[in-house]
Image: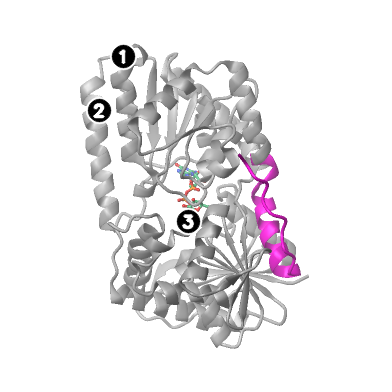
Amino acid sequence: MNRLIVISNRVSAPTDSNSGAQGGLAVALSAALRENGGIWFGWSGEVTDKFDGHINFQRSAGVTSATIDLEAQDLEEYYNGYANRTLWPLFHYRIDLAEYEREFAGGYQRVNDRFADTVRPLIEGDDVVWIQDYHMFPLGEKLRERGCGNRIGFFLHIPWPPRRLLNTLPEAAELAKKMFAYDVIGFHTQEWLESFFDFAEKDLGATIHENGMVELGDRRVLALADPIGIDAKEFVEGANSPTARLAFRQMRDSAVGRDVIIGVDRLDYSKGLEERFRGYERFLDKHPEERKEVFLLQIAPPSRGTVESYQKIRSALEGLAGKINGAYADVDWVPIRYVNQGYPRDQLAGIYRAARVGLVTPLRDGMNLVAKEYVAAQDPDDPGVLVLSRFAGAAAQLGEGAVLINPYSAEEMSDAIVTALRMGREERIRRWRLMMDNVEKEDVIWWRKRFTDALMEEQTPAPLPEIS
Ligand code: GDG
Protein backbone atom coordinates (compact mmCIF):
# COMPACT_ATOMS: atom_id res chain seq x y z
CA MET A 1 0.00 0.00 0.00
CA ASN A 2 1.29 3.49 -0.82
CA ARG A 3 2.12 5.82 2.03
CA LEU A 4 0.14 9.04 2.07
CA ILE A 5 1.71 12.48 2.49
CA VAL A 6 -1.00 15.01 3.41
CA ILE A 7 0.00 18.67 3.16
CA SER A 8 -2.15 21.53 4.45
CA ASN A 9 -1.60 24.98 5.92
CA ARG A 10 -2.27 23.75 9.45
CA VAL A 11 -1.90 20.22 10.71
CA SER A 12 -4.79 18.88 12.76
CA ALA A 13 -3.44 15.43 13.40
CA PRO A 14 -4.59 13.93 16.68
CA THR A 15 -2.63 14.85 19.78
CA ASP A 16 -3.10 13.59 23.30
CA SER A 17 -4.91 16.79 24.21
CA ASN A 18 -7.29 17.14 21.24
CA SER A 19 -8.51 13.55 20.82
CA GLY A 20 -12.26 13.61 20.37
CA ALA A 21 -12.20 17.32 19.52
CA GLN A 22 -11.06 17.03 15.91
CA GLY A 23 -13.32 18.09 13.06
CA GLY A 24 -14.54 15.68 10.36
CA LEU A 25 -11.79 16.52 7.87
CA ALA A 26 -9.08 15.88 10.45
CA VAL A 27 -10.73 12.62 11.47
CA ALA A 28 -10.92 11.40 7.86
CA LEU A 29 -7.36 12.34 7.00
CA SER A 30 -6.02 10.89 10.26
CA ALA A 31 -7.85 7.62 9.55
CA ALA A 32 -6.29 7.49 6.07
CA LEU A 33 -2.83 8.15 7.52
CA ARG A 34 -3.32 5.46 10.11
CA GLU A 35 -4.37 2.91 7.45
CA ASN A 36 -1.74 3.76 4.88
CA GLY A 37 1.03 5.12 7.03
CA GLY A 38 2.57 8.41 6.08
CA ILE A 39 2.94 11.96 7.30
CA TRP A 40 0.77 15.05 7.77
CA PHE A 41 2.87 18.09 6.96
CA GLY A 42 2.15 21.79 7.55
CA TRP A 43 2.73 24.96 9.51
CA SER A 44 3.08 24.47 13.28
CA GLY A 45 1.14 27.59 14.24
CA GLU A 46 4.39 28.98 15.69
CA VAL A 47 6.37 32.00 14.57
CA THR A 48 10.16 32.02 14.34
CA ASP A 49 12.59 34.95 13.93
CA LYS A 50 14.48 33.26 11.12
CA PHE A 51 13.12 30.40 9.01
CA ASP A 52 15.63 27.55 9.11
CA GLY A 53 13.70 24.64 7.61
CA HIS A 54 13.70 22.71 10.87
CA ILE A 55 10.98 20.05 10.92
CA ASN A 56 9.36 19.02 14.16
CA PHE A 57 8.11 15.41 14.06
CA GLN A 58 5.46 14.10 16.42
CA ARG A 59 3.68 10.80 16.59
CA SER A 60 0.35 10.45 18.30
CA ALA A 61 -2.61 8.06 17.97
CA GLY A 62 -0.91 6.30 15.06
CA VAL A 63 -0.37 9.44 12.99
CA THR A 64 2.94 11.17 12.30
CA SER A 65 2.85 14.91 11.91
CA ALA A 66 5.70 17.07 10.65
CA THR A 67 5.53 20.82 11.13
CA ILE A 68 7.60 23.89 10.38
CA ASP A 69 7.60 27.35 11.96
CA LEU A 70 7.22 30.42 9.72
CA GLU A 71 8.38 34.03 10.05
CA ALA A 72 5.99 36.84 10.99
CA GLN A 73 6.42 38.41 7.55
CA ASP A 74 5.57 35.07 5.90
CA LEU A 75 2.32 34.95 7.82
CA GLU A 76 1.46 38.54 7.08
CA GLU A 77 1.96 38.15 3.33
CA TYR A 78 1.04 34.52 2.71
CA TYR A 79 -1.66 33.76 5.29
CA ASN A 80 -3.27 37.06 6.27
CA GLY A 81 -2.36 38.51 2.89
CA TYR A 82 -2.66 36.35 -0.23
CA ALA A 83 -4.69 33.50 1.28
CA ASN A 84 -7.18 35.52 3.30
CA ARG A 85 -7.24 38.98 1.69
CA THR A 86 -6.80 37.98 -1.93
CA LEU A 87 -7.91 34.42 -2.65
CA TRP A 88 -10.61 33.89 0.00
CA PRO A 89 -12.71 36.94 -0.96
CA LEU A 90 -12.15 36.44 -4.70
CA PHE A 91 -13.08 32.75 -4.60
CA HIS A 92 -16.21 33.67 -2.61
CA TYR A 93 -17.23 36.16 -5.35
CA ARG A 94 -16.30 39.21 -3.23
CA ILE A 95 -14.02 41.11 -5.61
CA ASP A 96 -15.03 44.25 -3.71
CA LEU A 97 -13.02 42.91 -0.76
CA ALA A 98 -10.16 41.28 -2.67
CA GLU A 99 -6.76 43.00 -2.39
CA TYR A 100 -4.23 42.46 -5.14
CA GLU A 101 -0.83 43.35 -3.69
CA ARG A 102 2.47 42.20 -5.18
CA GLU A 103 4.05 41.57 -1.80
CA PHE A 104 1.16 39.24 -0.88
CA ALA A 105 1.70 37.27 -4.10
CA GLY A 106 5.47 37.22 -3.42
CA GLY A 107 5.05 36.02 0.16
CA TYR A 108 2.65 33.30 -1.04
CA GLN A 109 5.23 31.98 -3.51
CA ARG A 110 7.99 32.20 -0.88
CA VAL A 111 6.06 30.19 1.70
CA ASN A 112 5.08 27.60 -0.91
CA ASP A 113 8.81 27.34 -1.77
CA ARG A 114 9.55 26.82 1.91
CA PHE A 115 6.95 24.08 2.09
CA ALA A 116 8.35 22.45 -1.07
CA ASP A 117 11.97 22.63 0.14
CA THR A 118 11.21 21.10 3.51
CA VAL A 119 8.67 18.44 2.54
CA ARG A 120 10.42 17.23 -0.63
CA PRO A 121 13.08 15.11 1.18
CA LEU A 122 10.30 13.38 3.16
CA ILE A 123 8.60 12.06 -0.01
CA GLU A 124 9.80 8.59 -0.90
CA GLY A 125 9.47 6.03 -3.73
CA ASP A 126 5.81 5.46 -4.43
CA ASP A 127 4.34 7.76 -1.77
CA VAL A 128 1.16 9.51 -2.82
CA VAL A 129 0.90 13.22 -2.02
CA TRP A 130 -2.40 14.96 -1.23
CA ILE A 131 -2.35 18.76 -0.93
CA GLN A 132 -5.27 20.60 0.70
CA ASP A 133 -6.77 23.93 -0.22
CA TYR A 134 -6.16 27.41 -1.55
CA HIS A 135 -3.11 28.16 0.60
CA MET A 136 -1.14 25.70 -1.53
CA PHE A 137 -2.15 26.05 -5.20
CA PRO A 138 1.48 26.27 -6.47
CA LEU A 139 2.92 23.53 -4.28
CA GLY A 140 2.42 20.71 -6.79
CA GLU A 141 4.39 22.58 -9.45
CA LYS A 142 7.11 23.45 -6.94
CA LEU A 143 7.46 19.78 -5.99
CA ARG A 144 7.68 18.84 -9.69
CA GLU A 145 10.47 21.44 -10.11
CA ARG A 146 12.28 19.64 -7.30
CA GLY A 147 12.11 16.34 -9.14
CA CYS A 148 9.06 14.84 -7.47
CA GLY A 149 7.53 12.36 -9.93
CA ASN A 150 5.06 10.89 -7.41
CA ARG A 151 1.29 11.00 -7.85
CA ILE A 152 0.10 14.33 -6.46
CA GLY A 153 -3.51 15.32 -5.78
CA PHE A 154 -5.05 18.65 -4.80
CA PHE A 155 -8.42 19.30 -3.14
CA LEU A 156 -10.05 22.75 -3.09
CA HIS A 157 -12.34 23.26 -0.09
CA ILE A 158 -13.79 26.56 -1.35
CA PRO A 159 -15.65 27.37 -4.60
CA TRP A 160 -13.86 27.81 -7.92
CA PRO A 161 -15.25 31.18 -9.06
CA PRO A 162 -16.67 32.01 -12.49
CA ARG A 163 -13.97 32.94 -15.01
CA ARG A 164 -15.09 36.57 -15.33
CA LEU A 165 -14.42 37.04 -11.62
CA LEU A 166 -11.23 35.00 -11.51
CA ASN A 167 -9.84 37.09 -14.35
CA THR A 168 -9.73 40.14 -12.06
CA LEU A 169 -6.72 38.49 -10.38
CA PRO A 170 -3.61 39.76 -12.21
CA GLU A 171 -1.99 36.29 -12.18
CA ALA A 172 -5.18 34.28 -12.75
CA ALA A 173 -3.90 32.31 -15.73
CA GLU A 174 -0.59 31.41 -14.05
CA LEU A 175 -2.44 30.27 -10.96
CA ALA A 176 -4.87 28.10 -12.94
CA LYS A 177 -2.03 26.58 -15.00
CA LYS A 178 -0.50 25.30 -11.78
CA MET A 179 -3.44 22.92 -11.47
CA PHE A 180 -1.85 20.96 -14.32
CA ALA A 181 1.10 19.95 -12.15
CA TYR A 182 -1.33 17.62 -10.33
CA ASP A 183 -2.58 14.19 -11.33
CA VAL A 184 -6.01 14.60 -9.71
CA ILE A 185 -7.84 17.74 -8.56
CA GLY A 186 -11.08 17.70 -6.57
CA PHE A 187 -13.91 20.19 -5.99
CA HIS A 188 -16.96 19.88 -3.77
CA THR A 189 -19.59 20.27 -6.48
CA GLN A 190 -20.29 19.93 -10.16
CA GLU A 191 -20.76 23.71 -10.27
CA TRP A 192 -17.24 24.49 -9.04
CA LEU A 193 -15.86 21.77 -11.31
CA GLU A 194 -17.60 23.29 -14.33
CA SER A 195 -16.26 26.74 -13.44
CA PHE A 196 -12.78 25.25 -13.53
CA PHE A 197 -13.47 23.57 -16.89
CA ASP A 198 -14.74 26.87 -18.23
CA PHE A 199 -11.58 28.74 -17.21
CA ALA A 200 -9.31 25.94 -18.42
CA GLU A 201 -11.02 25.82 -21.80
CA LYS A 202 -11.64 29.50 -22.53
CA ASP A 203 -8.67 31.17 -20.82
CA LEU A 204 -5.98 28.53 -21.06
CA GLY A 205 -7.05 26.74 -24.25
CA ALA A 206 -7.21 23.34 -22.52
CA THR A 207 -9.22 20.41 -23.87
CA ILE A 208 -11.85 18.86 -21.61
CA HIS A 209 -12.60 15.18 -22.09
CA GLU A 210 -15.87 13.43 -21.17
CA ASN A 211 -14.29 11.50 -18.30
CA GLY A 212 -13.05 14.67 -16.56
CA MET A 213 -9.53 14.48 -17.97
CA VAL A 214 -8.27 17.97 -18.85
CA GLU A 215 -5.35 18.37 -21.24
CA LEU A 216 -3.04 21.36 -21.58
CA GLY A 217 -0.01 20.88 -23.79
CA ASP A 218 1.68 17.73 -22.58
CA ARG A 219 0.02 17.79 -19.14
CA ARG A 220 -3.15 15.94 -18.19
CA VAL A 221 -5.09 16.26 -14.95
CA LEU A 222 -8.17 14.37 -13.83
CA ALA A 223 -10.69 16.84 -12.37
CA LEU A 224 -13.60 15.53 -10.32
CA ALA A 225 -16.49 16.57 -8.10
CA ASP A 226 -16.12 15.00 -4.67
CA PRO A 227 -18.43 16.51 -2.04
CA ILE A 228 -17.01 16.36 1.48
CA GLY A 229 -19.20 14.90 4.20
CA ILE A 230 -19.07 14.61 7.98
CA ASP A 231 -18.25 11.65 10.17
CA ALA A 232 -21.98 10.93 10.48
CA LYS A 233 -21.65 7.95 12.78
CA GLU A 234 -19.43 9.81 15.19
CA PHE A 235 -21.68 12.86 15.08
CA VAL A 236 -24.83 10.86 15.82
CA GLU A 237 -23.04 9.24 18.76
CA GLY A 238 -21.95 12.68 19.92
CA ALA A 239 -25.53 13.93 19.71
CA ASN A 240 -26.59 11.10 22.06
CA SER A 241 -23.71 11.57 24.51
CA PRO A 242 -24.32 12.68 28.12
CA THR A 243 -22.77 16.09 27.31
CA ALA A 244 -25.14 16.56 24.37
CA ARG A 245 -28.15 15.45 26.39
CA LEU A 246 -27.33 17.94 29.10
CA ALA A 247 -26.82 20.74 26.55
CA PHE A 248 -30.15 19.79 24.94
CA ARG A 249 -32.01 19.97 28.26
CA GLN A 250 -30.41 23.25 29.25
CA MET A 251 -31.25 24.76 25.87
CA ARG A 252 -34.88 23.63 26.01
CA ASP A 253 -35.19 24.85 29.62
CA SER A 254 -33.83 28.26 28.75
CA ALA A 255 -36.15 28.45 25.73
CA VAL A 256 -39.21 28.17 28.04
CA GLY A 257 -41.40 26.64 25.35
CA ARG A 258 -40.22 28.88 22.53
CA ASP A 259 -38.88 27.48 19.26
CA VAL A 260 -35.14 27.84 18.82
CA ILE A 261 -33.73 28.91 15.46
CA ILE A 262 -30.02 28.11 15.35
CA GLY A 263 -27.13 29.51 13.31
CA VAL A 264 -23.52 28.31 13.78
CA ASP A 265 -20.80 29.87 11.66
CA ARG A 266 -17.26 31.11 11.83
CA LEU A 267 -17.59 34.88 11.87
CA ASP A 268 -16.97 35.35 8.15
CA TYR A 269 -18.62 37.60 5.55
CA SER A 270 -19.12 34.61 3.23
CA LYS A 271 -21.55 33.09 5.73
CA GLY A 272 -24.22 35.75 5.09
CA LEU A 273 -24.77 36.67 8.74
CA GLU A 274 -25.83 40.25 8.10
CA GLU A 275 -28.34 39.07 5.50
CA ARG A 276 -29.53 36.40 7.95
CA PHE A 277 -30.15 38.97 10.67
CA ARG A 278 -32.00 41.17 8.18
CA GLY A 279 -34.12 38.24 7.00
CA TYR A 280 -34.97 37.42 10.60
CA GLU A 281 -35.79 41.06 11.27
CA ARG A 282 -38.17 40.98 8.28
CA PHE A 283 -39.81 37.88 9.75
CA LEU A 284 -40.30 39.65 13.11
CA ASP A 285 -41.70 42.67 11.35
CA LYS A 286 -44.14 40.75 9.15
CA HIS A 287 -45.24 38.26 11.78
CA PRO A 288 -45.98 40.00 15.06
CA GLU A 289 -47.89 36.86 16.15
CA GLU A 290 -44.64 34.85 16.04
CA ARG A 291 -42.64 37.27 18.19
CA LYS A 292 -41.96 35.84 21.64
CA GLU A 293 -42.74 32.38 20.22
CA VAL A 294 -39.19 32.01 18.86
CA PHE A 295 -35.68 33.33 19.17
CA LEU A 296 -32.56 33.15 17.03
CA LEU A 297 -29.45 31.73 18.68
CA GLN A 298 -26.47 32.74 16.58
CA ILE A 299 -23.16 31.17 17.58
CA ALA A 300 -20.31 32.90 15.73
CA PRO A 301 -16.78 32.26 17.00
CA PRO A 302 -14.49 35.03 15.68
CA SER A 303 -11.97 34.09 12.99
CA ARG A 304 -9.14 35.88 11.14
CA GLY A 305 -9.51 38.82 13.51
CA THR A 306 -6.35 40.56 12.28
CA VAL A 307 -7.87 41.08 8.81
CA GLU A 308 -9.78 44.36 8.50
CA SER A 309 -12.81 43.00 6.63
CA TYR A 310 -13.34 40.57 9.52
CA GLN A 311 -13.19 43.38 12.08
CA LYS A 312 -15.76 45.26 10.00
CA ILE A 313 -18.19 42.38 9.72
CA ARG A 314 -17.88 41.80 13.46
CA SER A 315 -18.80 45.35 14.38
CA ALA A 316 -21.54 45.47 11.72
CA LEU A 317 -23.14 42.38 13.26
CA GLU A 318 -22.87 43.73 16.79
CA GLY A 319 -24.63 46.88 15.61
CA LEU A 320 -27.33 44.99 13.77
CA ALA A 321 -28.04 42.54 16.61
CA GLY A 322 -28.22 45.48 19.02
CA LYS A 323 -30.55 47.36 16.73
CA ILE A 324 -32.93 44.42 16.24
CA ASN A 325 -32.93 43.55 19.93
CA GLY A 326 -33.45 47.20 20.81
CA ALA A 327 -36.42 47.47 18.47
CA TYR A 328 -38.21 44.23 19.39
CA ALA A 329 -37.07 42.97 22.82
CA ASP A 330 -39.38 43.00 25.82
CA VAL A 331 -38.70 42.50 29.53
CA ASP A 332 -39.24 38.76 29.15
CA TRP A 333 -37.86 38.14 25.64
CA VAL A 334 -34.84 38.94 23.48
CA PRO A 335 -35.16 38.06 19.76
CA ILE A 336 -31.46 37.37 19.05
CA ARG A 337 -28.99 35.68 21.35
CA TYR A 338 -25.73 36.51 19.66
CA VAL A 339 -22.75 34.61 21.01
CA ASN A 340 -19.13 35.19 19.92
CA GLN A 341 -17.58 32.02 21.27
CA GLY A 342 -17.14 28.40 20.29
CA TYR A 343 -18.47 25.32 22.10
CA PRO A 344 -17.21 21.73 22.34
CA ARG A 345 -18.58 19.53 19.56
CA ASP A 346 -20.82 17.34 21.73
CA GLN A 347 -22.36 20.36 23.40
CA LEU A 348 -22.95 21.88 19.98
CA ALA A 349 -24.67 18.66 18.86
CA GLY A 350 -27.10 18.92 21.79
CA ILE A 351 -27.84 22.54 20.93
CA TYR A 352 -28.49 21.65 17.26
CA ARG A 353 -30.91 18.98 18.40
CA ALA A 354 -32.82 21.41 20.59
CA ALA A 355 -33.39 23.76 17.63
CA ARG A 356 -36.58 23.54 15.57
CA VAL A 357 -34.95 25.38 12.66
CA GLY A 358 -31.34 25.28 11.39
CA LEU A 359 -30.55 28.47 9.49
CA VAL A 360 -27.59 27.92 7.15
CA THR A 361 -27.55 30.83 4.75
CA PRO A 362 -24.08 31.53 3.32
CA LEU A 363 -23.82 33.86 0.34
CA ARG A 364 -21.31 31.42 -1.09
CA ASP A 365 -19.77 28.32 0.49
CA GLY A 366 -17.67 25.49 -0.93
CA MET A 367 -19.76 22.93 0.94
CA ASN A 368 -20.87 23.91 4.51
CA LEU A 369 -20.57 21.18 7.08
CA VAL A 370 -22.81 22.85 9.65
CA ALA A 371 -25.82 21.99 7.44
CA LYS A 372 -24.87 18.29 7.59
CA GLU A 373 -24.10 18.37 11.31
CA TYR A 374 -27.49 19.95 12.01
CA VAL A 375 -29.20 17.12 10.13
CA ALA A 376 -27.14 14.40 11.83
CA ALA A 377 -27.91 15.79 15.30
CA GLN A 378 -31.72 15.65 14.94
CA ASP A 379 -34.09 13.37 16.80
CA PRO A 380 -35.40 10.97 14.08
CA ASP A 381 -38.89 11.03 15.64
CA ASP A 382 -39.14 14.80 15.91
CA PRO A 383 -36.55 16.40 13.64
CA GLY A 384 -36.08 20.10 12.97
CA VAL A 385 -36.11 21.78 9.56
CA LEU A 386 -33.02 22.89 7.65
CA VAL A 387 -33.30 26.25 5.88
CA LEU A 388 -30.41 26.26 3.42
CA SER A 389 -28.90 28.75 1.00
CA ARG A 390 -29.01 27.59 -2.61
CA PHE A 391 -25.48 29.02 -2.91
CA ALA A 392 -23.92 26.55 -0.45
CA GLY A 393 -22.28 23.50 -2.01
CA ALA A 394 -24.39 21.42 0.40
CA ALA A 395 -27.55 22.42 -1.52
CA ALA A 396 -26.57 20.01 -4.32
CA GLN A 397 -26.91 17.08 -1.88
CA LEU A 398 -29.51 18.29 0.64
CA GLY A 399 -31.72 20.33 -1.67
CA GLU A 400 -34.57 17.82 -1.74
CA GLY A 401 -35.07 17.82 2.01
CA ALA A 402 -34.10 21.36 2.98
CA VAL A 403 -36.13 24.52 2.49
CA LEU A 404 -33.90 26.22 -0.08
CA ILE A 405 -33.63 29.99 -0.17
CA ASN A 406 -31.82 32.85 -1.82
CA PRO A 407 -29.97 34.38 1.15
CA TYR A 408 -29.87 37.84 -0.45
CA SER A 409 -33.66 38.04 -0.21
CA ALA A 410 -34.98 39.03 3.23
CA GLU A 411 -38.47 38.11 1.97
CA GLU A 412 -37.48 34.56 1.08
CA MET A 413 -35.66 34.15 4.37
CA SER A 414 -38.68 35.37 6.29
CA ASP A 415 -41.08 33.11 4.35
CA ALA A 416 -38.78 30.11 4.84
CA ILE A 417 -38.65 30.64 8.60
CA VAL A 418 -42.45 30.65 8.70
CA THR A 419 -42.64 27.53 6.51
CA ALA A 420 -40.15 25.76 8.77
CA LEU A 421 -41.88 26.76 12.01
CA ARG A 422 -45.29 25.64 10.76
CA MET A 423 -44.19 22.38 9.15
CA GLY A 424 -45.99 19.30 10.50
CA ARG A 425 -44.13 16.40 12.03
CA GLU A 426 -44.74 13.97 9.15
CA GLU A 427 -43.36 16.37 6.58
CA ARG A 428 -40.40 17.15 8.81
CA ILE A 429 -39.60 13.45 9.14
CA ARG A 430 -39.97 12.91 5.38
CA ARG A 431 -37.58 15.73 4.55
CA TRP A 432 -35.13 14.82 7.29
CA ARG A 433 -34.94 11.20 6.08
CA LEU A 434 -34.02 12.36 2.56
CA MET A 435 -31.20 14.48 3.95
CA MET A 436 -30.01 11.98 6.52
CA ASP A 437 -29.74 9.25 3.87
CA ASN A 438 -27.31 11.44 2.03
CA VAL A 439 -25.37 12.53 5.13
CA GLU A 440 -24.91 8.86 6.11
CA LYS A 441 -24.05 7.56 2.66
CA GLU A 442 -21.80 10.33 1.39
CA ASP A 443 -19.87 10.79 4.61
CA VAL A 444 -16.31 11.96 5.08
CA ILE A 445 -14.84 8.49 4.63
CA TRP A 446 -16.70 8.16 1.30
CA TRP A 447 -15.28 11.54 0.28
CA ARG A 448 -11.73 10.61 1.19
CA LYS A 449 -11.92 7.21 -0.51
CA ARG A 450 -13.40 8.67 -3.70
CA PHE A 451 -10.41 10.97 -3.95
CA THR A 452 -7.62 8.65 -2.86
CA ASP A 453 -8.97 5.82 -5.07
CA ALA A 454 -8.68 8.12 -8.05
CA LEU A 455 -5.25 9.25 -6.93
CA MET A 456 -3.81 5.85 -6.06
CA GLU A 457 -5.44 3.58 -8.59
CA GLU A 458 -5.77 6.04 -11.41
CA GLN A 459 -9.41 5.08 -11.40
CA THR A 460 -12.02 7.53 -12.65
CA PRO A 461 -14.83 7.74 -10.08
CA ALA A 462 -18.46 7.31 -11.06
CA PRO A 463 -20.23 10.59 -11.83
CA LEU A 464 -22.30 12.09 -9.02
CA PRO A 465 -26.01 11.29 -9.11
CA GLU A 466 -28.13 14.06 -10.59
CA ILE A 467 -30.37 15.84 -8.11
CA SER A 468 -33.28 17.69 -9.65
C1 GDG B 1 -14.31 25.34 4.75
C2 GDG B 1 -15.25 25.77 3.61
C3 GDG B 1 -16.27 23.47 3.65
C4 GDG B 1 -18.22 26.19 14.16
N1 GDG B 1 -18.46 26.75 15.36
C5 GDG B 1 -18.09 25.84 16.26
C6 GDG B 1 -17.59 24.71 15.61
N2 GDG B 1 -17.68 24.96 14.31
C7 GDG B 1 -17.31 23.96 13.29
C8 GDG B 1 -18.58 23.42 12.65
C9 GDG B 1 -18.02 22.84 11.35
C10 GDG B 1 -16.83 23.76 11.07
O1 GDG B 1 -16.56 24.51 12.26
C11 GDG B 1 -17.16 24.77 9.99
O2 GDG B 1 -17.18 24.12 8.78
P1 GDG B 1 -17.92 24.72 7.52
O3 GDG B 1 -17.90 23.68 6.47
O4 GDG B 1 -19.30 25.11 7.90
O5 GDG B 1 -17.14 26.05 7.12
P2 GDG B 1 -15.59 26.55 6.93
O6 GDG B 1 -14.91 26.67 8.23
O7 GDG B 1 -15.71 27.82 6.16
O8 GDG B 1 -14.87 25.42 6.07
C12 GDG B 1 -16.55 24.97 3.67
C13 GDG B 1 -15.19 23.09 4.65
O9 GDG B 1 -14.02 23.92 4.52
C14 GDG B 1 -14.74 21.64 4.48
O10 GDG B 1 -14.32 21.39 3.17
O11 GDG B 1 -17.45 22.78 3.95
O12 GDG B 1 -17.40 25.32 2.59
O13 GDG B 1 -15.51 27.17 3.65
O14 GDG B 1 -17.55 21.55 11.53
O15 GDG B 1 -19.15 22.49 13.51
N3 GDG B 1 -17.12 23.60 16.22
C15 GDG B 1 -17.15 23.61 17.60
N4 GDG B 1 -17.62 24.68 18.30
C16 GDG B 1 -18.10 25.80 17.69
O16 GDG B 1 -18.55 26.73 18.35
N5 GDG B 1 -16.69 22.54 18.24
* Residue 269, above or below 321: below
- Residue under label 1: 288
In depth, the one of 451 and 115 nearer the eye is 451
Contact between marks 1 and 3 (CB within 8 A): the answer is no
Residues at marks 2 and 1, CA–CA distance in whole angstroms: 14 Å
- Residue under label 2: 324
Judge whether residue 299 is colored magenta.
Answer: no
Residues at marks 1 and 3, CA–CA distance in whole angstroms: 38 Å
Judge whether residue 448 is colored magenta.
Answer: yes
> What residue appears at the point 52 percent right and 61 percent down from the top-left corner?
156
Q: Secondary structure at mark 2?
A: helix
Which badge, 3 or 2, comes first in the chain's sequence? 3
- Residue under label 3: 159
Assign the N terminus to one quadrant of the image: bottom right
Residue type, mark 1 in image: Pro
> What residue appears at the point 34 percent right and 23 percent down from the top-left corner?
283
Contact between marks 3 and 2 (CB within 8 A): the answer is no
- Image x and y of residue 201, in percent: 52, 69
**Mark 3 CB in 8 Å range of ligand 1?**
yes
Q: Which residues are magenta?
A: 439-468
Residue 203 lies left or right of residue 223; in this view the side is left
Sort mark 1 into few (<14), some (14-19) or many (20+) by Cα contacts within 10 Å. few
